[in-house]
Image (cartoon, grey):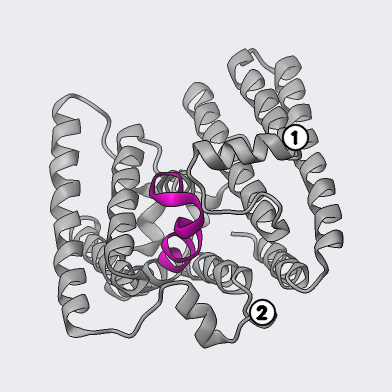
Amino acid sequence: MDPFIYLIFIPFLILIIALNKVKAHFFWIFNRILTILCSLTLFLSGIFVLFASTSLFISILLILAGLLILLLLHEKFRENLIKIGHLNIESENPRHYFALLLFFCILFAAIISFLWMTETGETIFKTEINAQFNIMDVVINEIFYLAIAIFGYGYLTRRNLKETLNSLGVKKLNFSGIVFGFIAGIGLIFLVIIFSLIFQHFGLEEENTDWLKNLISVQNAFIIGLSAGICEEILFRGALQPKFGIILTALLFTSLHMQYPALWMLFIIFTIGVILGYVRKMTNTTTAIIVHSTYNTVQMLMLCFVMG
């Protein structure tokens, strides 16, 4: 991956820290400007697709997404959205609004990108990311997820590290949590195998794992397993789930795993996201980390024997 892409992460994190420090009035001004820019980008993208291709469906989706983003500025619309979605956020809280805006922008962009790829066979942004994907890309991406969660929850601005981790549901390890997490992680492996066999029995295409070729090794299995388990769970189940609920969080979790082109595989990832959500709800984020890390590590080790 182009190393200059990493430079995008730094100003974004600085922005999150700065927004936690500014007064609510200035935060709202920023939110309104950002909303208009996001809405305009989606709307103009829809117009461009309409005139540049035959994909009327994608064009309409982009335009509708832009209009829906713009509607977030309407207080009554936000209140109804929060009520219907059972979201645990405050309509007039600028930090909550910022999270809501980013949540739906990322979700819409990922879904529309996947539909575009399904319809045309190409990604919206042509890139060689799969061919160049390496372990450093994975780790940096995961650390970025972790940083969003920690700084977004007020580390260095409103909370110290201990208070931040406690707010994210990160608790001390205990023996019962470790055992449960390990067993549940192995259980997820068997669940995925069963789902895969069922879907393939009905003639659905096999999962494309070509993008994983540069990552297959025993060492990388543990690196990916731990980094993804820790960072993704702290962001999705620790930071987002308490605000957006299990289903919406699992949907966003799935949308950020669009490297899997098979629709049935995305369904499995969504199911895993829901299960991890209930693990977090019944226990804590730490246990969800153990489940996720066990699942990822064992899955990667299995691929080492299959593809190695």
Question: In this view of the protein, which residue sits in the foreground, 169 or 305?
Answer: 169
How packed is label 2: few (under 14 Cα within 10 Å), some, or many (20 or more)? few
Q: Position of residue 198 (x, y in %)?
A: 14, 33
Q: Quadrant of the C terminus?
A: bottom left
Q: Does any portion of residue 110 appear in the rendered image? A: no
Residue 29 painted magenta: no
Residue 13 vs 155, above or below: the answer is above
Helix or strand or loop: what does disc 1 sit on?
helix
Q: Which residues are magenta?
A: 232-249
Residue 70: assigned label: 1
Residue 238 painted magenta: yes
Helix or strand or loop: what does disc 2 sit on?
loop
Q: Quadrant of the N terminus?
A: bottom right
How packed is label 1: few (under 14 Cα within 10 Å), some, or many (20 or more)? some
Q: Main secondary structure of the magenta part?
A: helix
Residue 98 vs 37, above or below: the answer is below
Query: What amino acid is labelled 2 in the image?
Result: Arg
Q: Residue at 63% across / 75% down in the picture?
A: 154
Image quarter of residue 221: bottom left
Residue located beneath label 2 in the image: 158
Question: In this view of the protein, which residue sits in the foreground, 93 or 127?
Answer: 93
Q: Earlier in the sequence, mark 1 or mark 2?
A: 1
